[in-house]
Image (cartoon, grey):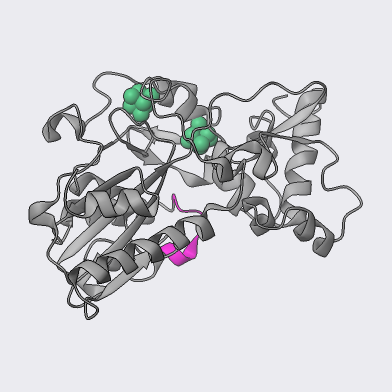
C-alpha cells in the first residue's frame, strides 16, 4: 500500500482510491434522465445544480484529484429477536455514520497537510454534498455500480459508507486503489454480468431497470425521506422494514463473501440495533424520541416518521394491510 493508501488506512478507511477529475458527461446525462422521470420523488434538492455532482471544479476550482474513501459496515448477521419486531437497515444499526466518517476525513486531511504542505486545499463530503460518490468511486477503480444502483467493491461488497475529498494535490497518478481489486478495472465496472437477483427480489419493484431506481417506490426512500402518508399499496409491501431496506443487498452474491467490519461504532450495541419493538415510539414526545435515539440515524428521521413506519409494520404483521 503506497501513497495516500497508508494515510487513509491510518485515518480509519479500509477502502480508498483516487480519480482524476474530468466531466462525467455520461453519468450527468443519466442523472438528468432520472430527474426528468421524477424518480427522485420529493427530494427536490437533487434538482439544484446537477452539474456539480459530476464536475469537481465547480466545487473546488483548483481540484486536481478526487479522493474516494470507504468504510465497510457489515457486522455479520444479527440474531433474530423473539416476538414481533420491525427491521432496521444495517447502515443504521449503530451510531450515525456522518459524524464518525467526518472525524476520519479531518484526520486524513491533517495527515495529508503534514505530508504535502499546509497550503494544500481540501473539500470533504460525507453523503451530504452534491457529489456523485458512486461515480467517483468507480472512476477511482474501487469497484463497479451494480444493478441495484450501489457501489460494489470486489472482495468487500456493497455495505460500505463512502466519502469524498476534493483536493488541489495531484495524487491520482501515483495512488492505486486498495484493497486492490482482484478484477481488472474493465471487469469490475460491471460486477453483475447476467445476474438479476436484486431486480427480482425488490418487494416494491423499485428497480425499474438495471441501475435505475424509482425512489418513489423504494422502501428506503419511503421510510426515511418521505413525509406524510405512504401509499397503502406500497405500505403493504414494506413487510417488517421500519427504517430503510436491505433486500437488494442481502440477495447480492457479492455480499456474503464481503468484508465483515471490525467497527464497534456500527455494531447493534452502539445504536438502535437491528430490530425495533413495535412500540418504540409510543408515548414519546419529539424531544424525548430524539433524546432516546440521539447520535443515531433514526434521530434524523424523527418520531413522527418512525411511528408511522412502525404502525405500517404492525399492520403488515397482523395481515391488515392492502397487500398484507
Ligand atoms: S432498498 Fe429495498 S425497496 Fe429499495 S430498491 Fe432495494 S430492495 Fe427495493
Ligand atoms: S444482486 Fe446481482 S444484479 Fe444485483 S447488484 Fe448484485 S450482482 Fe448485480
Q: Is residue 110 above or below residue 178?
A: below
Q: Is residue 297 visible?
A: yes
The verdict on residue 43 being magenta is yes
For this orientation, the residue located farthest to the left is 173
Q: Report ligand 2 position as a quadrant.
A: top left
Percent x, y of residue 241: 66, 34
Report the front residue among 198 and 140.
140
**Residue in the image at 21% along x and 67% along y:** 115
Is residue 239 depicted above or below 131 in this figure?
above
The span picked out in magenta is 39-46
In the rendered image, is residue 231 in sight? no
Provide residue 317's location: percent of width, then percent of height. Answer: 78, 25
Provide the major secondary structure of the magenta segment.
loop
Q: Nearer the viewer, residue 300 or 100?
A: 100
- In the shown orientation, is residue 255 left or right of residue 81? left
From the viewer's perspective, tell me whether residue 281 is left or right of residue 134.
Answer: right
Residue at x-position 78% and y-position 60%: 291
Q: Quadrant of the C terminus?
A: top right
Tell whether 259 sits left or right of 265: left
- Residue 91 drawn in magenta: no
Quadrant containing the N terminus is: top left
Return the x and y of residue 29 as percentages of the image width and height. Answer: 23, 55
Count of residue discs: 0
At 46% from the left and 66% from the top, the residue drawn is 45
Q: Is residue 97 above or below residue 199?
A: below
Q: Residue furthest right?
A: 283
Question: Could you tell me residue 242's position as x and y percent?
Answer: 69, 39
Amino acid at each position: 500500500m503506497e501513497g495516500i493508501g497508508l494515510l487513509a488506512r491510518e485515518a480509519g478507511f479500509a477502502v480508498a482510491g483516487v480519480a482524476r477529475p474530468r466531466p462525467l458527461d455520461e453519468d450527468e446525462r443519466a442523472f438528468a434522465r432520472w430527474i426528468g422521470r421524477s424518480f427522485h420523488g420529493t427530494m427536490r434538492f437533487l434538482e439544484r445544480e446537477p452539474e456539480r455532482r459530476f464536475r469537481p471544479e465547480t466545487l473546488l476550482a483548483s481540484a486536481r484529484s478526487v479522493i474516494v474513501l470507504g468504510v465497510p459496515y457489515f457486522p455479520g448477521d444479527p440474531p433474530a429477536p423473539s416476538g414481533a419486531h420491525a427491521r432496521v437497515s444495517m447502515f443504521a444499526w449503530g451510531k450515525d455514520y456522518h459524524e464518525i466518517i467526518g472525524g476520519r476525513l479531518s484526520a486524513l486531511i491533517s495527515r495529508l497537510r503534514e505530508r504535502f504542505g499546509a497550503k494544500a486545499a481540501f473539500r470533504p463530503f460525507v453523503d451530504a454534498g452534491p457529489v456523485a460518490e458512486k461515480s467517483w468511486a468507480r472512476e477511482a477503480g474501487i469497484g463497479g455500480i451494480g444493478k441495484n444502483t450501489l457501489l460494489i467493491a470486489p472482495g468487500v461488497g456493497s455495505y460500505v459508507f463512502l466519502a469524498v475529498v476534493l483536493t488541489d494535490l495531484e495524487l491520482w497518478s501515483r495512488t492505486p486503489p486498495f484493497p486492490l481489486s482482484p478484477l481488472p478495472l474493465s471487469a469490475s465496472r460491471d460486477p453483475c454480468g447476467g445476474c438479476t437477483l436484486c431486480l427480482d427480489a425488490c418487494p416494491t419493484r423499485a428497480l425499474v431497470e438495471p441501475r435505475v431506481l424509482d425512489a418513489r417506490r423504494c422502501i428506503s426512500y419511503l421510510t426515511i425521506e418521505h413525509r406524510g402518508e405512504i401509499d397503502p399499496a406500497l405500505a403493504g409491501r414494506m413487510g417488517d422494514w421500519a427504517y430503510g431496506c436491505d433486500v437488494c443487498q442481502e440477495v447480492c452474491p457479492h455480499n456474503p463473501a464481503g468484508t465483515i467490519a471490525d467497527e464497534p461504532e456500527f455494531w447493534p450495541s452502539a445504536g438502535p440495533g437491528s430490530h425495533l419493538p413495535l412500540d418504540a415510539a409510543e408515548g414519546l414526545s419529539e424531544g424525548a424520541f430524539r433524546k432516546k435515539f440521539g447520535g443515531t440515524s433514526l434521530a434524523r428521521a424523527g418520531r413522527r416518521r418512525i411511528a408511522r413506519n412502525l404502525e405500517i409494520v404492525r399492520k403488515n404483521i397482523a395481515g391488515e394491510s392492502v397487500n398484507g
